[in-house]
Amino acid sequence: MNTFAKALFFALGINAASADSVGSIRGAVVDSELVAAKKTGTSYCTWSPDNSCYKNGWPSCCSTNALNCPKTQPPCDKQTGTSYCTWSPDKSCYKNGWPSCCDVNNGNSCPKEQPVCDKNPGSNYCTWSPDYKCYEDGWPSCCDTNALNCPKTQPACDKKPTRSPTKKPTNNNRRPTASCVPDDRPRPVRDGQRFRFNLVDDNAECVDSRDQLYEYGQFVDTLDFSECADLCVNSVPSNLAFSSSFRGFDFECASATCNCLYDAGTLNSKNSNTFQRINKSPTGRGSISGTTPRSSAYCGKLVGAEAVEDIVADA
């Protein structure tokens, strides 16, 4: 309390200690009034700020045009921790408040990108059945990176015109295409997640945007394209299967070999023991962007992963 205030209270016959008590009581009353007024008004945009839930104290729509805010108060947008499994629950998006992978293995097997909502399946076009007539990978490309950032309106088709067929080299040792690739869109499942692979091209190996090959771990005696997909998902350590550096696979039909593809620097002595052979020389990184010619080889691109329960719900 400053000198002027003490003098004033002295003139009024109130000692400093009593003044401090009065101030404390008044502060308590004010705090009580604030608590009581925390949720006054018909709009949550007029309530007292909740900094434990929202970055700015209120839902973001209140900062733009509160008249356009939804009737139901939006979920918290304050994110704590490095994993979305530790963020505030979002029950408007997820049935349990978090992606289903957070309930498995303490969330350690979750993909790097946050999965799409699982509440009201079918409301997001990223959860619809694939449309290969419209999209190269069956879904808009934004669904393969971070579906939460996809636009509200479904993007236009990105399917390119079918290329004119090219003459394939003759190889008497090569098995017929049907036996090499019984399914050009295999969908193996692991720990409740379905992995989606698409055949990019035949007589070709996968390359990145710089036309660089990827480092790989190899399995031998592989039956076909589909088995190669399953091996790369279910016969490797989980930290490789669910790694953001896992890009797809090359299946070499004539030699029956399966190469699981990863960004350069991914494989090491601790995570590659299940492979019969590894090659760390290639420098490819990032999403598979094209192919380079190689006889009897088939490039399979990982285009996404989703919870199995979403598949059942959509069926």
Image (tube, rainbow, N blue to C red):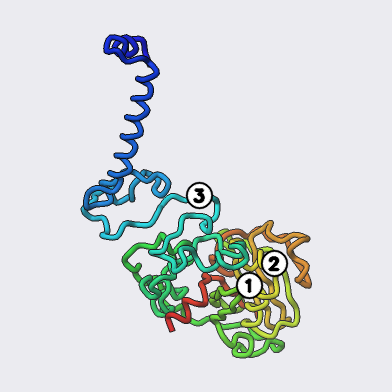
Quadrant of the snapshot with the N terminus: top left
SS at badge 3 = loop
SS at badge 2 = strand
Closer mark to the observer between disc 2 and disc 3 = 3
* Label 3, label 1: how far apart the Cα atoms are: 35 Å
Q: Amino acid at mark 2?
A: Tyr
Residue 128 appears left or right of 43: right
Q: Earlier in the sequence, mark 3 or mark 1?
A: 3
Camera-side residue: 55 or 189? 55
Classify 10 Å Cα crowding around label 3: few (below 14), some (14-19), many (20 and above). Answer: few
Image quadrant where residue 20 sits = top left
Q: Earlier in the sequence, mark 1 or mark 2?
A: 2
Q: Amino acid at mark 1?
A: Phe
Q: Tell me the number on the disc at residue 216.
A: 2
Q: Disc 3 designates what residue?
A: 80
Image quadrant where residue 37 sits = top left
Residue 187, percent from left and from top: 56, 79
* Label 2, label 3: how far apart the Cα atoms are: 35 Å
Residue 28, percent from left and from top: 35, 34
Q: Disc 1 designates what residue?
A: 249
Q: Amino acid at mark 3?
A: Thr
Looking at the image, can residue 243 be seen?
no
Looking at the image, can residue 144 be seen?
yes
Residue 158 appears left or right of 12: right
- Say above or below: 139 vs 284: below
